[in-house]
Image: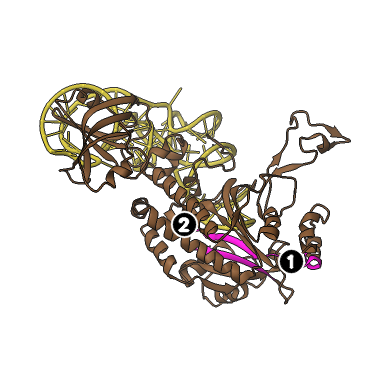
Amino acid sequence: MQRSKIKDIFAREQSGGDVLVQGWVKTRRSSKSVTFVQITDGSTLQDLQIVVDESNPSHEAASGLTTGCSVSVEGVLVESPGQGQKYEVQASSLTVLGESDPDSYPLQKKRHSPEFLREIAHLRPRTNTFGAMARVRNSVAYAIHTFLQERGFQFIQTPIITASDAEGAGSMFQVTTLDLNDVPKDAGKVKHEVDFFGKPAFLTVSGQLEAEIFAMALSDVYTFGPTFRAENSNTSRHLAEFWMVEPEVAFCQLDGLTELAEDFLKYLCGHVLDKCPEDMAFFNKFYDDSTIATLEGIANSQFERITYTEAVKMLQESGEKFEYPVTWGIDLQSEHERYLTETKIQRPVIVTDYPKGIKAFYMRLNDDDETVRAMDVLVPRIGEIIGGSQREERREVLEARMSESGISHDEYSWYLDLRSFGTVPHSGFGLGFERTVQFVTGVSNIRDVIPFPRTPGSAEF
RNA sequence: UCCCCGAUAGCUCAGCGGUAGAGCGGUCGGCUGUUAACCGAUAGGUCGUAGGUUCGAAUCCUACUCGGGGAGCCA
């Protein structure tokens, strides 16, 4: 008999017929006359109840089941007389595939703290929370590809190893095959020429610059892959290894980019609400009772658009006491971003046109010569979920900005070339994948929305 | 990296100078178409690590480790 997934069983129009189901035991309740076994196979949040009567030859095996055991069950799908589920399986046979010692199996049929579950990352996918998280995460990833593909974007695989040592987005992990206990040196300096790539190499902090190359040929492209930051960041929204989506759009200026970002986020939220209603109801119940309302609200509301200068004015006139006073030219602090998106405007806010001094060299300079065409999308609870800009397409201006920032023209000659040979206005942004999953689920710590989190001092599993 | 808080049974926590506790989970028994089942019994801890103060430290002090919240960096 072919195995049925639990999700498909609950989707059936009516009961009846033999089924084969396989999964892991969540909990078991037994008496002399009957045993109830709840099993999950990860296809859905909902457990399937297996009923094994005393007369069944498998009853002894069933009554000894403990949380975590794996089982294979054949039986008849019937309407459940009990409360809490539509169908149940009246077992004809039950086979234990794998035992699970109850003395040492760490998961119990009760709620565990996310901190504890993180320590047993090899078993936490079996919990309701992490199963739901994995399905939502999958759904968001699928929606990212679907949205961009339907708009004609090409998926570009940009390199994970890069030799550019100054992408400007933070500290990088170095990649080397040199023996760190015996580093070859010449007059006290490391001989990088004998290293694997013949020069220093690093893990990428962004695929943007390479994505720009393909945007200058294929028009609309995106990258979606792992990104690495060696910052010593210890917060609930930073990881050393995370995933990022980076659309790059040719013939597009900043206003077009903000529209793309807004449509994109709305699509992702709508997709998850549509495809993962049970998992979202779970998160709404146990993690953040406003998350579904927030996502629904996003689908139906306009994102607010303000310039940095307007944001500064808004903050100064707010009457709020901020720890860091607001003056034009400073970078907005978390408390300022939170005030804007959570208190003042109460929905996503797109802030544009930041002072050039606090933004990257590749962002397009405005005519005022003081601000650049940057854009940050701020959302409640998370803060910055998207950072992007219109890129500087004028070679002379870009060169001047690189010189100001101390960026080598030689190393980025290829990046400058794009401005010499058929340059066009273009724009792009980076969306933090884990931050998006955090925002969607309402789970507060980013370590709990990625299967195996990498943070300073921690790279387990 | 900085500031604040925490670490006691497998899990979640109480105890805060005088012989280590509860609930849940585990085990044994009972009972019931049960559903975080229920009832009874029972086992289980060098109180994060290392020092110090004290007649006496889980409790007070110091350092370290790990975790949480916040900040910076950013996605």
Q: Is residue A196 magenta?
A: no
- The spot of residue A13 in percent (x, y) is 24, 48
The quadrant the N terminus of chain A occupies is: top left
Q: Which of the 4 quarters of the picture holds residue A281?
A: bottom left
Write down the chain letter for disc 1.
A
Residue at horizontal 75 percent and vertical 32 percent from the top: A178
Hey, what amino acid is under mark 2? Phe
- The chain carrying label 2 is A
Crowd class of label 1 (few under 14; some 14 to 19; many from 20; radius 10 Å):
many
User: Gap in Å between the C-alphas at discs 1 and 2?
Assistant: 33 Å
State the SS at label 2: helix
Q: Residue at x 79, y 65 (%)?
A: A395
Amino acid tagged 1: Glu
Name the residue at the right extreme. Answer: A187
Label disc, if present, on residue A393 of the rendered structure: 1
Task: Note whether residue A442 is visible.
Answer: no
Reply above or below: A168 against B65.
below
Q: Secondary structure at mark 1?
A: loop
Q: Is residue A451 left or right of residue A193?
A: left
Residue on which the image places disc 2 = A439
| Residue drawn where x is 42% and y is 35% of the image | A123
Residue A280, position as x, y percentages in the image = 37, 53
Please name which of the two marks, 1 or 2, marks the residue nearer to the observer. Answer: 1
